[in-house]
Image: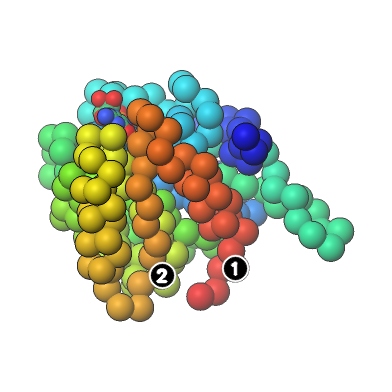
């Protein structure tokens, strides 16, 4: 087994506004998903840290942006290691979130995606059995308009047969709008499907150039 490049992730802070996030330097990847999509489980599986993001939290607890630091990424040509972070964005859609809070996060997430200099891309987590709900479409739309790369984890793949999962993945890839820099893969935090590929995708995003 190859070593996990995301091993050693640590909680840094939880924020209610972008201005409270860590300094905007280095490289970061944001994780987004409707509540209950399996985002916390995916973060835990990818980082190999069982308790990193709390799974099945009460709705109130999901309503923050959470920053995790990663071990610095080595770079070639004698360059200094790259400071790296993951940002867990608040999810809503499934859990009942009051309308004003929903609106707050919609604006805050949009502004974050547009203006965050260190942001290299978004990992969007969706349940493979019913991806592309309103929240998912909104995120893809934001990525498209902000020129951000997006990698989709179609999670809970253990709930489908391999055939059904492959079909869902193909359908998802087809539905990406033209011009969106998006990739997708099958994932399961439960049985480990796609975890290594997911880690590689996150590292590839962190190392990616900002300009598309
Ligand atoms: P979040 O709200 O997006 O952070 O979702 P959680 O990670 O808390 O997961 C929501 C529910 O889905 C929990 O009951 C998890 O145990 C379950 N879940 C998450 N990932 C998977 C998976 O890959 N397979 C299965 N079968 N269940 C999962």
Locate residue 212, reporting x and y percent. 51, 75
Work out which residue is located at the far right of the displayed protein and give it. 78
Work out which residue is located at the far bottom of the displayed protein and give it. 179
Q: CA distance from mark 2 to mark 1?
A: 13 Å
Seen in the image, is 203 located left or right of residue 126? right
Name the quadrant containing residue 137: bottom left
Q: Residue at x 49, y 47 (%)?
A: 197
Q: Is residue 52 above or below residue 205?
A: above
Give the residue at mark 2. Answer: 181
Coloring scheme of the render?
A: rainbow
Locate residue 106, reporting x and y percent. 26, 53
Seen in the image, is 85 located left or right of residue 53? right
Locate residue 68, reporting x and y percent. 53, 36
Seen in the image, is 44 located left or right of residue 157? right
Residue 91, disc: none
Whether residue 12 is visible, yes or no, is no
Q: Residue at x 30, y 64 (%)?
A: 173
Whether residue 85 is visible, yes or no, is yes
Q: Quadrant of ligand 1?
A: top left
Q: Describe the element under mark 2 as helix, strand or loop.
A: loop
Q: Residue at x 86, y 59 (%)?
A: 78
Seen in the image, is 106 located left or right of residue 116? left
Locate residue 198, reporting x and y percent. 47, 46
Q: Describe the element under mark 1 as helix, strand or loop.
A: loop
Density class for disc 2 (Cα within 10 Å; few <14, some 14-19, many ≥20) is some
Q: Nearer the viewer, residue 144 or 42?
A: 42
Give the residue at mark 1. Answer: 209
């Amino acid at each position: 087994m190859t070593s996990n490049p995301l091993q050693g992730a640590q909680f840094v802070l939880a924020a209610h506004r972008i201005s409270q996030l860590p300094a905007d330097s280095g490289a970061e990847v944001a994780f987004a998903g409707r509540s209950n999509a399996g985002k916390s489980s995916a973060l835990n599986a990818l980082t190999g840290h069982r308790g990193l993001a709390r799974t099945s939290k009460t709705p109130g607890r999901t309503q923050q942006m959470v920053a995790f630091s990663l071990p610095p990424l080595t770079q070639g040509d004698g360059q200094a290691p790259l400071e790296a972070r993951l940002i867990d964005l608040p999810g809503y859609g499934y859990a009942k979130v009051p309308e004003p809070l929903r609106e707050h996060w919609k604006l805050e997430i949009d502004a974050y995606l547009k203006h965050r200099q260190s942001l290299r891309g978004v990992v969007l987590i969706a349940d493979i059995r019913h991806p592309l709900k309103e929240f998912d479409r909104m995120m893809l739309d934001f990525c498209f308009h902000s020129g951000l790369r997006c990698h989709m984890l179609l999670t809970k793949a253990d709930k489908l047969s391999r055939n059904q999962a492959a079909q869902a993945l193909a359908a998802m890839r087809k539905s990406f709008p033209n011009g969106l820099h998006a990739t997708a893969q099958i994932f399961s935090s439960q049985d480990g499907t796609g975890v290594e590929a997911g880690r590689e995708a996150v590292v590839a995003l962190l190392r990616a150039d900002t300009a598309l």
